[in-house]
Image (cartoon, rainbow, N blue to C red):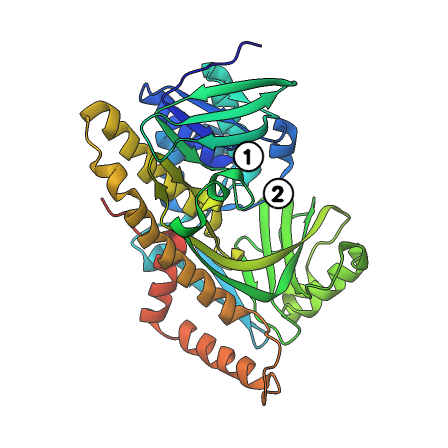
Amino acid sequence: MSLPTRTQVAIIGAGPSGLLLGQLLHQAGIDNVILEQRSADYVLGRVRAGVLEQVSVDLLDEAGVGARMHREGLVHHGIELMFSGERHRIDLAALTGGKSVMVYGQTEVTRDLMDARREHGAPIVYEAEDVALHGFDGHAPTVTFRKDGVEHTLACDHIAGCDGFHGVARASVPVGAIRQFERVYPFGWLGILADVPPVSDELIYANHARGFALCSMRSASRVRLYVQCSLQDKVEDWSDERFWAELKSRLDPATAERLPTGPSFEKSIAPLRSFVAEPMRFGRLYLAGDAAHIVPPTGAKGLNLAAADVRYLSRALIEHYADKSDAGLDDYSRKALRRIWKAERFSWWMTSLMHRFPAGPGDTGEVGHRMQTAELDYLVHSQAAMTSLAENYVGLPFEE
């Protein structure tokens, strides 16, 4: 296979942020090459988020890849919070002037973007080994990599680092040029996928003395379910029978009674962290998505933040080439981080509100749980508090 040696934008990472950026740039006539360390099957096999903000839905439509999402995705106008044995609905649409969210798995978003790139014949290199970034602090950056044992050099104008938390892009930045902020939470999420109908038409977030639980879905016949677990737990410790019993114990009796159960076909434990790297621009290298930030999944913000980064970055690059202006590129990091920290705050708040935390010094653990219950009780009886939650959940407006 003949690989390009020159492009305008080199994109590192073929997850949804890299693919979406590539699609938007391609539509604007900007050449780009995507380099991905893993295989296409590996990328598609990663199980991730499933709730899209309205603004993310709009961006996928803008990219021309929204048709299947609208056919198969599930529009949700509300969510439910469960505590003290009762469920309380938050009417997102009524509280935000008609805005909603779309349940559509990240795997499906990735598949749609892969199909679009293949259809356009835009270059993408999977299983690119030893990717290294060079010269991004000057005017002629390059990316070197090895494919099928052959060394390659890709010259470019700009590099977009969309290769995730453990990727090479952020690791290439000199230590003194970047600040990293992190909070690691003292628990994880055990999640399963199962082909059974959802127990509810909308997501249920449960606060329980035994720990957090979430009833979510990927379709009308496939569920994604979670329970809070110890970081010392291993997947092998959790049989399907144990998982279903634990989930039922954390739901209200009526919901637990009608919960459909069945064999899981995917099961994993994910740690929770809040992480931000600042700034997000280093000369001609721009970080986007998980390369720059991680949020706990409680607020359903991970994929949506990545899409927001791509929206800002794609517009800035289009402005650079079309209008010969670097104003958008110069302001990219500030704009993106302003939105990121608001999403980090919301995700931290949701996590703090819904999870059972280990007892601290002089605390039996009950104090925190009583505080959570009081805040939840206030939340579901306050129009102002519910509006704040709803506005953040459906996605804050973009800074233009």
- The quadrant of the picture occupied by the C terminus is top left
Q: Residue at x 68, y 63 (%)?
A: 231
3D distance between C-alphas at marks 2 and 1: 10 Å
- Front residue of 89/308: it is 308
Q: Residue at x 59, y 22 (%)?
A: 146
Where does residue 383 sit, x and y in percent of width and height?
Answer: 33, 70
Q: Earlier in the sequence, mark 2 or mark 1?
A: 2
Where does residue 242 sit, x and y in percent of width and height?
Answer: 79, 61
Q: Residue at x 41, y 47 (%)?
A: 305
Relative height, residue 79 to residue 29 (above, below): below
Q: Quadrant of residue 29?
A: top left
Q: Please name the residue that numbered disc 2 is placed on.
A: 47
Where does residue 55 sit, x and y in percent of width and height?
Answer: 35, 43
Q: Please name the residue that numbered disc 1 is placed on.
A: 108
Where does residue 181 sit, x and y in percent of width and height?
Answer: 45, 59
Q: Is residue 87 visible?
A: no
Q: Residues within 10 Å of mark 2 (few under 14, many from 20)?
A: some
Left-right relation of 55 to 75: left
* Kind of residue at disc 1: Glu
